[in-house]
Amino acid sequence: GIQVEQSPPDLILQEGANSTLRCNFSDSVNNLQWFHQNPWGQLINLFYIPSGTKQNGRLSATTVATERYSLLYISSSQTTDSGVYFCAVNAGGTSYGKLTFGQGTILTVHP
Amino acid sequence: GAVVSQHPSRVICKSGTSVKIECRSLDFQATTMFWYRQFPKQSLMLMATSNEGSKATYEQGVEKDKFLINHASLTLSTLTVTSAHPEDSSFYICSASNAPGNGELFFGEGSRLTVL
């Protein structure tokens, strides 16, 4: 099956810093989503981005499907950005509901 | 976006008992819902696909008799963990899409099961 690798596994920042999270995947995808899992476990949708670039406030994401990677940019980080960031892909030829998740990046933002 | 809600958010039960978790789509109808499981400090994995009015389909390695799924209406799917054991302790989270052709999935709040 498709492999999804996220880097870095852990990231510690001071409030106000910028960061880039990376997601590499091993095969073509129909769908790619970025999520933020908050301390209570809820998955918050950040981006639905099978290709191209999107921006939402301090967050933006770029997926280069032909090169099989996606990047999530966080600018001017805040303590509330702390949590786990997951990249998840839907591989070609599979049900749209089957997302394969990476192992996540644990982000800690200190005041 | 679409709103998916789960209940209960936390449940503690004794070994050997059964536990039911509900997943509802609040502002759209979902003929298909998806149940995922997340063990501590790990990623999420799809367990099964819940189909309204028909049998669920299970991923390889998931016991269908252990994890009973019912999708009786267009807004409700239930997951029943039968004869629960401590190894079933996990975070169970459901998802659905309000536009299946689009493919964006929205997740519920999750249900944390602890089996004593």
Image (cartoon, helix red, strand yellow):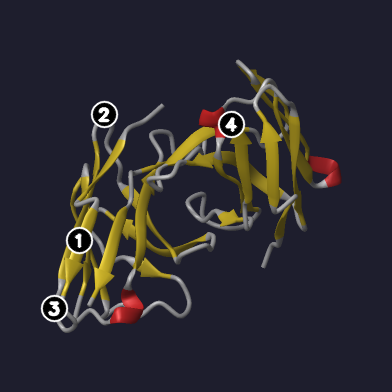
Amino acid carrying mark 3 in the image: Thr
Image coordinates for residue A64, horizontal then vertical, percent:
80, 37
Q: Mark 1 points at which residue?
A: B11
Q: Name the residue under label 4.
A: A47
Left-right relation of B69 to A81: left
Left-right relation of A46 to B53: right
Q: What's the distance in space between the residues labelled 2 and 4, CA to CA? A: 20 Å
Question: The residue tagged with tag 1: helix, strand or loop?
Answer: strand
In the displayed image of the protein, which residue is found farthest to the front? A111
Residue at the image point whose x is 21% and y is 42% from the top: B75
Q: In which quarter of the image is residue A75?
A: top right
Question: The residue tagged with tag 2: helix, strand or loop?
Answer: loop
Residue at the image point whose x is 40% and y is 77% from the top: B62
Image coordinates for residue B66, horizontal then vertical, percent:
27, 79
First in sequence: mark 3 vs mark 2: 3
Q: What's the distance in space between the residues labelled 2 and 1, CA to CA? A: 25 Å
Classify B112 as above or below B58: above
Q: Name the residue under label 3.
A: B17
Circles 3 and 2 on the same subunit: yes
Question: The residue tagged with tag 4: helix, strand or loop?
Answer: strand
Q: Which of B83 and B69 is in front in this view?
A: B83
Circles 4 and 1 on the same subunit: no
Tell me, yes or no, whether the two marked residues, 4 and 1, touch with CB atoms within 8 Å: no
Chain letter of disc 3 in the image: B
Disc marking residue B59: none
Q: Is label 4 or label 3 in front?
A: 3
